[in-house]
Image (cartoon, grey):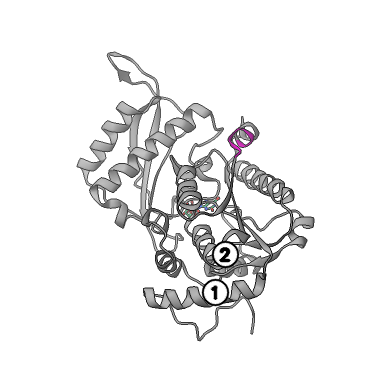
Amino acid sequence: MNENMRPESMERITTPTLAETFIEEQIAEVRAQVGNKKVLLALSGGVDSSVVAALLIKAIGKQLVCVHVNHGLMRKNESENVIEVFRNQLDANLIYVDATDRFLNLLEGVADPEKKRKIIGAEFINVFAEEARKLEEVSFLAQGTIYPDILESIKQGEGKKAVKSHHNVGGLPDDLAEKFALVEPIKFLYKDEVRVVGRALGLPSEMVDRQPFPGPGLGVRCLGAITRDRLHALREADAILREEFDNCGLAKTVWQYFVSIPDIKSVGVRDDSRYEGWPAIIRAVNTKDAITATIEEIPYAVLHKITQRITSEVEGINRVLYDLTPKPTGTIEWE
Ligand code: XMP
């Protein structure tokens, strides 16, 4: 049997009971695999790495070393939440690295989306590798690989052209990659199963039910060359969108929603004076697999409230637009 194919006999995990059984099996397997050695995990705070972290904390406790790299492109309060849940509530061994300046300095003046992705991906590995080198006696690297990642890489291997380059932690320098054996406890799970397992592990709903967030984060939503002031405006506007979607219940139903800010300004008025600002572009899409997507019909009252709040509360923004373009022709992200 190919060790990267989900066994046909594996039942779909849809209930807490099935999740418990899966968790017990994985705990036994992980303990048998790693013995008393240490395991390193890059913990982004996304669903997959969070579920792996919670599972491994249960299996091996402090033998797991989590590294959370804040690349400065996180949504508002995300790194703080990772620290709160994993360090404070689950008592994890968590190394927090604030690498904001490193990333933003490297990205200064870089407008090309693919170059931005490459810089963010490569620097992420640099920071993570530096932390890994500081640690002694780590023999394993845990990854939140899930089954669609495996299927996707098989497809790409067949020569399909990828629309965008996505990064993961897999690309460590050879000397480190050789040093580590992989621990991938959720590699046969689909996303819905990962969430069921996450809930059974007691992770909070904000973490388990969160929408997908690209690895390069707000880096691909602060369009063109990133500046700190526009990035700050983006983070604040995005937080207002999320708050209002929470308030009206859309957060529970819409698959992915976010703000992007292009590098253009228009004329406006604020406090009776000319006020030049950026437009905040809202995107709210529904999809099953992110290959095609439709647009959520947000009630006008909600759009008006969001517009009113963003234009009055966020420095630098003077217009709010709603992107009505389905995928295709638009991709979900703007770049
Ligand atoms: P697109 O924009 O390609 O997005 O229609 C499809 C899904 O993928 C996410 N996305 C990314 N995820 N790294 C990631 O990890 C990336 O560079 C990246 N670009 C897009 C996007 O948010 C959507 O869910």
Disc 1 secondary structure class = helix
User: Disc 2 versus disc 1: distance between alpha carbons?
Assistant: 14 Å
Count residues near mark 1 (Cα–Cα under 10 Å), then give few for <14, some for 14-19, many for 20+: some
Which residues, given as a range, are shown in magenta?
98-103
User: In the rendered view, does 335 fall on the left or right side of 172?
Assistant: left
**In the image, residue 231 above or below residue 181:** above
Quarter of the image holding residue 14?
Answer: bottom left
Q: Main secondary structure of the magenta part?
A: helix
Give above or below for 238 relative to 233: below
Residue at far top of view: 273
Depth check: give the residue in front, 70 or 134: 134
N-terminal of the pair, mark 2 or mark 1, is: 1
The residue beneath circle 2 is 145
- Name which residue lies at 42% across and 65% down: 195
Question: Residue 27 versus residue 117: which sits nearer the camera?
Answer: 27
Mark seen at residue 26:
1
Give the x, y percent position of residue 279: 39, 31
Residue at the spot 62% in from the left edge and 75% down from the top edge: 4
Residue 213 part of the magenta-drawn span: no
Say above or below: 234 vs 257: above
Q: Mark 2 near ligand 1 (CB under 8 Å)?
A: no
Answer with the quarter of the image where residue 253 lies. bottom left
